[in-house]
Amino acid sequence: MTMEWNSFYGEDVSTSCIGCSLVNGEVDASKFLLGCSENFTIGQDTEVPIPGFIVIGAKEHVNDISMFSEAQFAELMILVQKIIGVLKEKLGIESFDCFYKEKHTSHFHFCIFPRYEWMKEHGKGLSSIEPIYAYAIENMKTEENLQEIRRVLDLIKDEISEYIN
């Protein structure tokens, strides 16, 4: 089954598995992918243009966290810890929502969702994420914001370089 994927970067891809296409280098991910660790891809969410909204995806077709080995789980948690540390230290972000998606695709996704001050008008907690997504998709696809996303990705990449290639 072929799926269509459109990012706010202007990438339009038709593929049977976007996760595999990223891992295999079939998609130009240079604008949003920080890199890969042994078991994961790490990059900016490509649908919602919020600086620092990072998605860590399993390289393999694993969509259930209980299928991870202890080493894979430890690797994931180290990446989460390091990325949140960078966002707190370099950007002053004080809170995050972290969640994972199972069965959404054939690749497990762990999301690090930074909570900026402007988001408070949309509510608190997980129920506010959808309205924030909608607002960001509608209002934040500006060149200025895309430059900020790139700047944030560069900050993160510098700080986690020992964990990715």
Image (spheres, grey):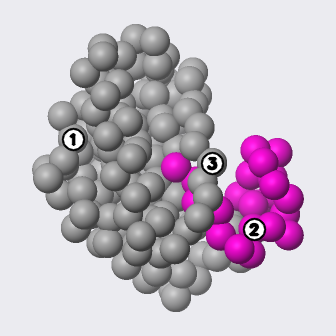
Label 2 with label 1: CB-CB less than 8 Å: no
Q: CA distance from mark 2 to mark 1?
A: 31 Å
Q: Position of residue 134 (x, y in %)?
A: 76, 60
Q: Nearer the viewer, mark 1 or mark 3?
A: 3
Amino acid on which disc 1 is placed: Ser
Q: Is residue 4 left or right of residue 126?
A: left
The location of residue 123, given as percent across then percent down, is: 85, 59
Classify mark 2: helix, strand or loop.
Answer: helix
Label drawn at residue 119: 2
Q: Quadrant of residue 19?
A: top left
Number of other residues with Cα within 10 Å of mark 3, as a class: few under 14, some 14 to 19, many 20 or more: few
Q: Is residue 67 visible?
A: yes
Q: Is residue 121 placed above or below 1 in the rendered structure?
A: below
Q: Is residue 109 left or right of residue 120?
A: left
Gap between marks 1 and 3, in whole Å? 22 Å
Q: Which residue is mark 3?
A: 97
| Residue position for label 1 | 37
Residue extent of the magenta highlight: 112-134
Which residue appears at 14% of the width and 53% of the height?
162
> Picture coordinates of residue 44 (x, y %)?
44, 58
> Mark 1, residues whose alpha carbon is within 10 Å: few (<14), some, or many (≥20)?
many
The residue under label 2 is which amino acid type? Met
- Asked if residue 130 is among those painted magenta in the image, a careful observer would answer yes
Write the residue at 46% across / 47% down. 55
N-term-proximal mark, 1 vs 3: 1
Q: What is the distance, in whole Å, between disc 3 and disc 2 at their CAs?
A: 12 Å
The foreground one among 57 and 121 is 121
Q: Nearer the viewer, residue 100 or 60?
A: 100
